[in-house]
Amino acid sequence: MKFAPYQTIESLQEYLLVSQWEQRVEVFRRRDRKFLLLQTYTTDEIVELQSINIEIPIAAIYEGVDFGS
């Protein structure tokens, strides 16, 4: 699992998993030295990254992506 090594980076505060099959982004945030899944975003939602104070529409993340039929 790729996520495990990243958990040891102390300065990493948020970790995103971006689906390649559907418009879905999962945001994990560090709390008390552990990462917890705090938010799942789907179509038409705005992804919030607190560690860098930014909001990104999920449509912008998936711009140009064709999931097929």
Image (cartoon, rainbow, N blue to C red):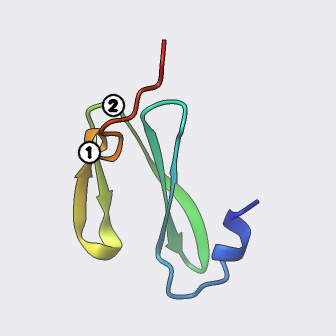
Q: Report crowding for label 1: few under 14, some 14 to 19, many 20 or more residues within 10 A (C-alpha).
A: few
Percent position (x, y) of residue 53? 24, 71
What residue is shown at x 50% (from left), y 80% (from top)? 12
Marks 1 and 2 sit apart, C-alpha to C-alpha, by 11 Å
Where residue 33 sits: x, y (%)? 60, 80
Task: Report the side of 1 relative to 3 (left or right).
Answer: right
For the view shown, which residue lies furthest in the right direction? 1
Tell me if residue 15 comes above or below residue 27 in the rendering: below
Q: Which mark is in front, 1 or 2?
A: 1
Q: Residue at x 71, y 75 (%)?
A: 5
Tag 1 secondary structure: helix
**Labels 1 and 2 touching (C-beta < 8 A):** no
Q: Which residue is most to the top?
A: 69
SS of the residue at dot 2? loop
Closer to the camera in the image, 55 or 68: 68
- For the N terminus, the image quarter is bottom right
Residue under label 1:
60
**Residue at (52, 73) in percent of width and height:** 31
Mark closer to the chain start, 1 or 2? 2
Q: Is residue 42 left or right of residue 44?
A: right
Q: Is residue 58 left or right of residue 10?
A: left
Residue 50 screen position, x and y as percent: 31, 68
10 Å crowding of disc 2: few (<14), some (14-19), many (20+): few
Tell me which residue sits at (45%, 45%) in the image: 25
Please determine whether, in this image, residue 58 is positioned above or below residue 13.
above
Kind of residue sitting beneath label 1: Ala
Residue 6, horizontal then vertical, whole percent: 64, 75
Task: Choose top left, top right, bottom left or bottom right for residue 20.
Answer: top right
Q: Which mark is residue 52?
A: none
Three-letter amino acid code of the residue under disc 2: Thr
Task: Return the residue at label 2.
Answer: 43
